[in-house]
Image (cartoon, grey):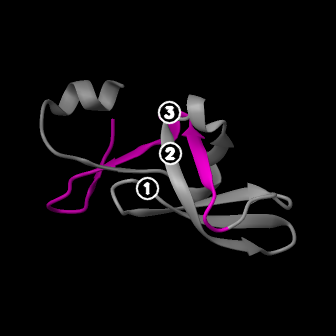
């Protein structure tokens, strides 16, 4: 990723928007998580998941998704839709 090549080795915070996450088969997923909360709002389903690190992420999927709290899920994303931040200042790192 160009931004990572430009900033060199250091700690960064990586973010992804809820609508940019998608469910994938657990065995093929970039991230594995446990479903914590499922909110079915009609037009979409918002799923809060807990990663192995203990951090929570939110995924917003169109329609009604058949998933329940406690289930293991795989999460995928397009790497081009990731956002990078300086963990000290919180400022966005942009290319």
Q: Rounded to the nearest whole Å, what is the CA distance between mark 2 and mark 3?
A: 20 Å
Q: Earlier in the sequence, mark 2 or mark 3?
A: 2
| In this view, 79 is above or below 34 | above
Q: Quadrant of the rendered structure where residue 34 is?
A: bottom right
Taking the magenta stretch, the answer to whether it contains residue 77 is yes
Q: Are marks 2 and 1 in contact (CB under 8 Å)?
A: yes
Name the quadrant of the C terminus. top left
- Depth check: give the residue in front, 5 or 48: 48
Q: Rounded to the nearest whole Å, what is the CA distance between mark 1 and mark 3?
A: 21 Å
- Depth check: give the residue in front, 72 or 79: 72
Marker disc for residue 80: 3
Q: Rounded to the nearest whole Å, what is the CA distance between mark 2 and mark 1?
A: 6 Å
Taking the magenta stretch, the answer to whether it contains residue 60 is no
The residue at which mark 2 appears reads as 32
Image location (x, y in percent) of residue 66: 81, 58
Q: Quadrant of the rendered structure where residue 91 is?
A: bottom left
Categorize mark 2 by other alpha carbons within 10 Å: few (<14), some (14-19), many (20+).
Answer: many
Magenta stretch bounds: 69-95
Q: Quadrant of the rendered structure where residue 44 is?
A: bottom right
Provide the secondary structure element on which disc 1 rests: loop
The residue at which mark 1 appears reads as 51
Q: Earlier in the sequence, mark 1 or mark 3?
A: 1
Is 55 placed left or right of 76 in the picture? left
Front position among marks 2 and 3: 2
Is 67 placed left or right of 75 in the picture? right
Marker disc for residue 83: none
Front position among marks 1 and 3: 1
Image location (x, y in percent) of residue 76: 57, 39
């Amino acid at each position: 990723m160009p931004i990572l090549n430009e900033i060199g080795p250091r700690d960064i915070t990586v973010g992804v928007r809820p609508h940019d996450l998608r469910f994938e088969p657990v065995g093929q997923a970039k991230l594995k998580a446990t479903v914590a909360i499922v909110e079915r709002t009609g037009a979409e389903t918002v799923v809060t998941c807990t990663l192995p690190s203990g951090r929570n992420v939110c995924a917003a999927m169109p329609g009604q998704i058949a998933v329940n709290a406690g289930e293991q899920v795989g999460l995928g994303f397009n790497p081009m839709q990731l956002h990078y931040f300086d963990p000290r200042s919180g400022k966005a790192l942009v290319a």
